[in-house]
């Protein structure tokens, strides 16, 4: 990099990322976006101005030192870049792929005021993938303490919390109900967007930190949260079980056999590997003409999976317009490239049966946008007399999820009105020592938000256990001058320099 | 966690077998009416099975399985004492309350005979008068008679051919119990949907609380996929987390049966392929298995299997 770059001297165009051609990739589950080469990464890293106000750091839910890692990358110091990244982010390969950077770090990038913003996500992925390929792991010195921490759910929130607590010296056990760890990264996000090998590698890194994974364990039913504290000897528990409970539309024909949730479609395909049926036992017969209701990231995944499983035609049915679609722009674009047909401002009214328990068609009506609703998006209003029948043999609902009821059924955790776990601003729940974060607290959100919540909960948990991080400034109101000795809080039991892997 | 070793096995008939699986923690947690999800191997599917018994001292979970499809037949062949299951997760579902009723009829037919046992035992332990009505095809297929007698005040056996007990369907047994006792306050029925519907119909006139345990197709069993949704009255419920017990007078059985047939054709194909590969490996040794995957599977004469959807009795 050498000399200081200005907006005029940096490469003006954002470095494009190579992708598999749409007609090739719809026939397989290979990753669509191929990633940067070293040259491409170096070129893109030059576009970072290293501006002093660093808006990107604040734009990142886990506050990665973005200019820092890009600077190292620009000097071709990949290991250095990796060290900086992993100081704050546990899963760079995952986040580089699935974070909505365009609405986070890249949205506030100074370069983006004039040109296309720096491709921060792509650079992050490049560094993360390099580390996986080279086998780099940053194992910190871990000062063991006597605390045992239980984590419920092995998705992004649980993984992030587990990593931080393991680094703080705790004995961490992660419980997963499925037979493989990874949560939504495994069962939800398909291989062509996030290969399972990447997730497995990141989980292996967690194991190296000493984190234990116990699969096939349905917490709540096999043992309760209260039992974890009282009988199983955990000093603190983090609940990150996700939302998960799929919403059905509640229209006639919902229960027909050709109607399924995107969760079911994706789980069968990704986790249970129905795409390899009959070599794997789980079936997933796909229709010829598929209608996916919804336009979020999950809907895009469901549509693109359907194409790869051999559907002849895949349609997206969404009651608002493209501008309101919650999916990332890149995902909508990829789906369009692959031949998904979008029907904006269209809402299903009923699913029509074929007389044999399956689906023949879906009755839809046209919508128009009215005044904004509480989400700030314009409310779709039905157009009178606009009903029409849309031929389809498989309907997939990707219209969101509700809170999973198991935690509420089996523990004394206080829930909010919508059934999600109620927490204070530090993610502490109504039971002392139990923290919660991710979708089960906020409702469906993104992977990185869940990871942010997991890390925040880990900080609260460390405070609860009186584990102190010497790099964190503490202000303890009631310690006072008498409670401290030479500026050290006498109640601090443990001084550890916490660093990411 | 648990090593999921198979501690004992018993074969009740050509298609019905019992597996006792080690899982001390689950044995401690299990309650009547709950189920597990089992995977035989890492390429397997996840199948829900109702817990037929649990032994806290031995630390074991007992499953009684009917070989009706590829996975259950493969388990029948491979699950020997000393081998282990790949995965077993649970206990899932809301436990059945067995403390309120004073006099109860527990009905089990076909697939449902074994899973009704924990409920009968639970009711007995809370001091209820328990009448069990069990349906089998014929005398030779009867199992657990002694086990049931130990926890029941009355046992009514029903067989298709009348070789033991009364000749007829379990609903005849239920009618008999209802005729003899005017003060029955609960009926619990587990079995094929047709049987559970018949039981619910039998009690409807007298407005006796009737609980049925549904076992639809599931993937995760934790409320995540929605595959197990059941219509109960005006509502849609997920059997895995809202059930598996529901009010038999409200369950839409037509819908339940239709949804159970969802994968019939692919399941049938998978089973035929598996049967064919078993034969091939018997005749030619394991190397022939590779050849099979490329070629068309030879037609197989399948075992005479009970149809889980239409059967009222079972065996």
Image (cartoon, coloured by chain):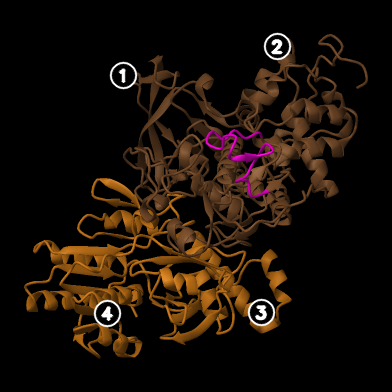
* Residue B56 point in image, percent of width and height: 42, 78
> Chain drawn brown, letter?
A
Residue where numbered disc 2 is placed: A113
| Badge 1: residue crowd in 10 Å (few <14, some 14–19, many ≥20) | few
Marks 1 and 4, how far apart in space?
Answer: 56 Å
Position above or below: A463 against A122: below
Q: Quadrant of the N terminus of chain B?
A: bottom right
Q: Alpha carbon of mark 1 to alpha carbon of mark 2: how far? A: 43 Å
B200, above or below A311, in the image: below
In primary-sequence order, the first of circles 3 and 4 is: 4
Residue B281 disc label: 3
User: The disc numbered 1 marks a residue on which chain?
Assistant: A
Dominant secondary structure of the residues highlighted in magenta in the image: loop
Marks 2, 4: nearer the viewer: 2
Front residue (pair A397, A336): A397
Disc 3 residue crowd, few under 14, some 14–19, many 20+, Cα 10 Å: some
Instruction: Give x and y (percent) for residue B252.
Output: 26, 54
Check disc 4 and report the residue beneath it: B135
Quadrant housing the C terminus of chain B: bottom left
What range is drawn magenta here?
A473-494
Find the distance from the CA under tag 3 to the CA under tag 2.
Answer: 68 Å
* Residue A45 falls in image quadrant: top right
Residue A145 or residue B233, whichever sits in front = A145
Do we see residue A196 in this rendering?
no
Q: Position of residue B15 (x, y in %)?
A: 44, 80
Q: Is residue A330 magenta?
A: no
Q: Is residue A310 above or below residue B126?
A: above
Q: Residues within 10 Å of mark 2 (few under 14, many from 20)?
A: few
B301 sits left or right of B128 in the view: right
Marks 1, 4: nearer the viewer: 4
Q: Give the residue number, with chain letter if any, for mark 1.
A: A384
Say which chain is orange. Answer: B
């Amino acid at each position: 990099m050498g000399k200081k770059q200005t907006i005029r001297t940096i490469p003006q165009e954002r470095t494009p990322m190579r992708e598999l051609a749409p007609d090739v990739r719809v026939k397989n589950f290979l990753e669509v976006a191929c990633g940067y080469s070293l040259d491409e990464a170096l070129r893109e890293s030059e576009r970072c101005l290293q501006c002093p106000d660093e808006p990107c750091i604040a734009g990142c839910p886990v506050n990665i030192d973005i200019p820092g890692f890009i600077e190292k990358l620009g000097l071709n110091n990949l290991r250095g870049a990796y060290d900086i990244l992993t100081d704050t982010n546990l899963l760079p390969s995952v986040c580089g792929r699935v974070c909505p950077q365009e609405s986070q770090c890249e949205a506030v990038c100074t370069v983006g005021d004039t040109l296309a913003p720096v491709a921060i996500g792509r650079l992050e992925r490049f560094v993360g993938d390099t580390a996986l390929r080279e086998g780099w792991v940053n194992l910190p010195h871990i000062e063991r303490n006597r605390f045992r921490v239980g984590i419920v759910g092995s998705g992004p929130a649980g993984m992030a919390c587990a990593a931080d607590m393991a680094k703080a010296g705790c004995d961490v056990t992660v419980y997963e109900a499925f037979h493989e760890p990874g949560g939504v990264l495994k069962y939800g996000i398909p291989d062509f967007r996030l290969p399972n090998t990447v997730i497995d590698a990141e989980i292996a890194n967690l194991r190296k930190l000493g984190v234990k994974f116990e699969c096939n364990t349905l917490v709540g039913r096999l043992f309760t949260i209260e039992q974890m504290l009282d009988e199983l000897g955990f000093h603190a528990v983090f609940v990150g079980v996700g939302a998960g409970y799929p919403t059905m539309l509640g229209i006639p024909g919902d229960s027909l056999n050709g109607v399924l949730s995107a969760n079911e479609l994706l789980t069968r395909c990704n986790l249970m590997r129905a795409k390899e049926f009959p070599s794997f036992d789980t079936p997933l017969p796909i229709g010829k003409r598929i209608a996916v209701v919804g336009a979020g990231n999950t809907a895009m995944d469901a549509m693109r999976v359907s194409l790869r499983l051999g559907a002849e035609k895949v349609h997206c049915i969404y009651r608002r317009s493209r501008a309101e679609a919650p999916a990332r722009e890149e995902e909508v674009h990829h789906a369009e490239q692959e031949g998904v047909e979008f029907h904006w401002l269209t809402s299903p009214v009923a699913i029509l049966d074929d007389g044999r328990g399956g689906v023949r068609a879906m009755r839809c009506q046209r919508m128009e946008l009215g005044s904004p609703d509480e989400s700030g998006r314009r409310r779709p209003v039905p157009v009178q007399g606009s009903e029409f029948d849309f031929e389809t043999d498989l309907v997939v609902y990707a219209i969101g999820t509700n809170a999973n009821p198991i935690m509420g059924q089996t523990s004394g955790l206080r829930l909010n009105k919508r059934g999600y776990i109620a927490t204070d601003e530090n993610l502490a729940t109504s039971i002392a020592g139990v923290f919660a974060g991710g979708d089960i607290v906020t409702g469906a959100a993104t992977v990185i938000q869940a990871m942010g919540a997991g890390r925040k909960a880990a900080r609260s948990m460390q405070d609860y256990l009186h584990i102190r991080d010497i790099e964190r400034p503490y202000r303890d109101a009631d310690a006072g001058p008498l409670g401290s000795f030479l500026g050290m809080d006498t109640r601090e039991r443990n001084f550890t320099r916490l660093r990411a892997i | 966690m648990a090593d999921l070793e198979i501690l004992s096995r018993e074969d009740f008939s050509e298609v019905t077998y019992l597996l006792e699986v080690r899982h001390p923690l689950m044995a401690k947690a299990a309650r009547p009416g709950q189920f597990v999800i089992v995977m035989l191997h890492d390429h397997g599917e996840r199948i829900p099975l109702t817990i037929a018994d649990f032994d806290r001292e031995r630390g074991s979970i007992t499953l009684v399985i009917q070989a009706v499809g590829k996975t259950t037949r493969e388990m029948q062949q491979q699950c020997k004492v000393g081998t282990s299951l790949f995965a077993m997760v649970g206990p899932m579902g809301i436990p059945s309350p067995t403390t309120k009723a004073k006099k109860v009829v527990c009905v089990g037919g076909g697939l449902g005979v074994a899973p009704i046992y924990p409920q009968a035992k639970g009711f007995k332990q809370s001091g209820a008068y328990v009448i069990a009505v069990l349906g089998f095809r014929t005398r030779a297929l009867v199992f657990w008679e002694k086990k049931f007698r130990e926890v029941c005040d009355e046992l009514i056996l029903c067989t298709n051919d009348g070789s033991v007990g009364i000749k007829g369907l379990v609903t005849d047994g239920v009618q008999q119990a209802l005729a003899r006792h005017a003060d029955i306050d609960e009926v619990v029925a587990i079995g094929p949907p047709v049987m559970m519907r018949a039981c619910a119909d039998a009690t409807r006139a007298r407005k006796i609380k009737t609980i049925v345990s549904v076992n639809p197709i599931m993937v995760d069993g934790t409320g995540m996929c929605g595959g197990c949704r059941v219509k109960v009255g005006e509502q849609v419920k997920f059997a895995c987390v809202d059930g598996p017990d529901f009010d038999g007078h409200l369950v839409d059985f037509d819908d339940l049966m239709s949804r159970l047939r969802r994968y019939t054709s692919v399941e049938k194909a998978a089973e035929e392929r598996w049967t064919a590969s078993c034969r091939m490996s018997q005749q030619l040794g394991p190397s022939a298995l590779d050849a099979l995957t490329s070629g068309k599977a030879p037609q197989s004469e399948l075992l005479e299997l009970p149809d889980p959807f239409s059967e009222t009795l079972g065996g």
